[in-house]
Image (tube, rainbow, N blue to C red):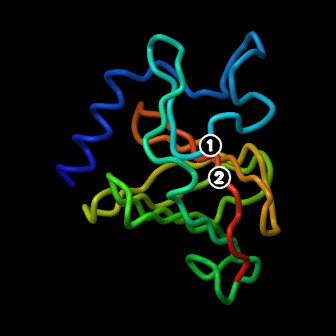
Amino acid sequence: MKKITYILVLLCLVTSCNNDDDINNDATNETECNYQGFSYLDNSNNDQTIIAESELNTQYFPNASNGPYGAPGIEIVSFSSSPTIFFTTNVNELNETGTGRLTLDSGEEQGVTVTCQRAGTAVGDEIRLDVVYGNIEVEFCVIIDEVL
């Protein structure tokens, strides 16, 4: 837990808001994922990628029998990046908000709030998930690699 808290606190110090939340409708990821991966928007209004999309494997599970937590869902993993990441959620419909689980660097699994901002169901489709842990907000902007 200390490691994930440290990483997320570090993000909190440099994060002002998410890179698709914008009242002026000019955020970099407002309409499409121009900055793909696991990212955040820093205090200087610059997109910062924690893990590039190319290092993430995204799986979509359309059936309750094989999805996370016994329901259709999404799993995003990278064991070769730094930090390593394991993320699961059943939030996969546009504008749906719910919970997810996030583990960084094999640390303790943390519950997070997830909002689906772009939904996809096929290989090559884009998925955008807003992830909030306390007052820290990050984003997954990924392409589905596998449908299982």
The crowd level at tag 2 (other Cα within 10 Å; few <14, some 14-19, many 20+) is: many
Q: Is residue 3 left or right of residue 97?
A: left
Which structural element holds mark 1? loop
The crowd level at tag 1 (other Cα within 10 Å; few <14, some 14-19, many 20+) is: many
At a point 66% along the width and 59% down the height, the residue shown is: 91
At a point 56% along the width and 46% down the height, the residue shown is: 37
The x and y percentages for residue 62 are: 76, 77
Q: Is residue 129 above or below residue 65?
A: above
The residue tagged 2 is 142
Q: Is residue 40 left or right of residue 129?
A: left
Q: Is residue 12 above or below residue 75?
A: above
Count of labels in the image: 2
Tell me the number on the disc at residue 36.
Answer: 1
At a point 75% along the width and 10% down the height, the residue shown is: 24
Q: Is residue 38 left or right of residue 20?
A: left
The x and y percentages for residue 95 are: 77, 45
Q: Is residue 113 left or right of residue 30?
A: left
At a point 21% along the width and 55% down the height, the residue shown is: 1
Q: Earlier in the sequence, mark 2 or mark 1?
A: 1
The x and y percentages for residue 74 are: 63, 67
Q: Amino acid at mark 2?
A: Val
Q: Amino acid at mark 1?
A: Gln
Name of the residue lying farthest toward the left: 2
